[in-house]
Amino acid sequence: MELRNLVTFVKIVENGSFTRTAESLGYSQSAVTMQIKQLESELGTPLFERIGKKIRLTAAGEKLFPYAAQTAELAGEAFRAVTDVDGEGGTLRLGTAESYVIGILPRVFAALAETCPKAEISVSTGSVDELTEKLRRNETDAIFFLDRRIYDPDWIKAIETPVRIHFVASVKNPLASERGVSLARLSEEPLFLTEKGVSYRYAMEQTLAEKGFSLHPFLEIGNTDVITRFVSENRGISFLPEYVVGPLVKKGELAVLDTECPEIVMWSQFVVHRNKRMTPLLKKFIELAKTE
């Protein structure tokens, strides 16, 4: 089997389209089609079902994909190893949460730029389910997320750190100076929350539901910068991770509220697929991320 044909096969699966694959690889669509026909001829079985404009992997295609993806990745790593012998460069595809992009990763990226100036970092964001699926399909090299402890036999977990989640308000809010703020009192405040289904929000909602309370947010949005801006302006309260609110608490803009809600702890987790080669760049990234 030709490596070129395997790479094209992997790209078609990732793109979901022969046309987009041809564009991304700089081939004509007929060349892409010919490469897949060659691969199917060698294997003696079709790899895709083509119905109208939609394509879908056959059972044989499903079996081939993980091997083809691993082969393509190894070939890429071989190329990068030869073209970047000093280990200061290379590429890293990272899947993470938007709050990490805002709250944690800028400092890691800044440190990485100093030690690995030739590196190329690509970041995609999504839910935990979306990130783990990308890792499974080799669409990302590593994922960095916040959730309950999650384990998978195909993973190597390089980081697992507890993160406390807090109700917060502006230091100007009367609740900032109160002790044992009741859940009923919290429910009276305008609430700014991350989107429904985010791990720590779900944990908080479940905890409150056990006590007969439910909170109804004024605004739901994925961008934690927007949330902290509203809360700092004393427009309401929020429920956010320590890494998001900590710097603003130190600046004297936000206060962590003392509430009746039991403490909720999630886990910051950095995961690499077990078959992924730990490149110098990936090792350096993990080392820097552990300090955050």
Image (cartoon, grey):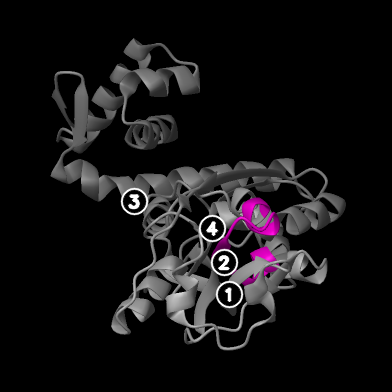
Q: How far apart are the two marked residues, 1 and 3, measured between alpha carbons? A: 41 Å
Quickly name the residue at label 3: 66
Quickly name the residue at label 4: 142
Quickly name the residue at label 1: 166
Mark 1 and mark 4 lie on one chain; the one further toward the N terminus is: 4
Quickly name the residue at label 2: 240
Q: Tell me the element at label 3.
A: helix
Query: Nearer the viewer's eye, disc 1 or disc 4?
Result: 1
Query: Nearer the viewer's eye, disc 3 or disc 4?
Result: 4
Query: Nearer the viewer's eye, disc 3 or disc 2?
Result: 2
Residue 65 on image: x %, y %: 31, 45
Mark 1 and mark 3 lie on one chain; the one further toward the N terminus is: 3
The residue range painted magenta reads: 229-245
Residue at point 87%, 52% (across, down):
114
Please tell me in which quadrant of the rendered image residue 291 appears: bottom right
Residue at point 68%, 48% (across, down):
81
Q: Are marks 2 and 1 in contact (CB under 8 Å)?
A: yes
Q: Is residue 31 left or right of residue 243?
A: left
Q: How far apart are the two marked residues, 1 and 4, measured between alpha carbons? A: 27 Å
Mark 3 and mark 2 lie on one chain; the one further toward the N terminus is: 3
Please tell me in which quadrant of the rendered image residue 129 appears: bottom left
Q: Amino acid at mark 3?
A: Pro
Crowding near the residue tagged with mark 3, few <14, some 14–19, many ≥20 C-alpha atoms within 10 Å = some
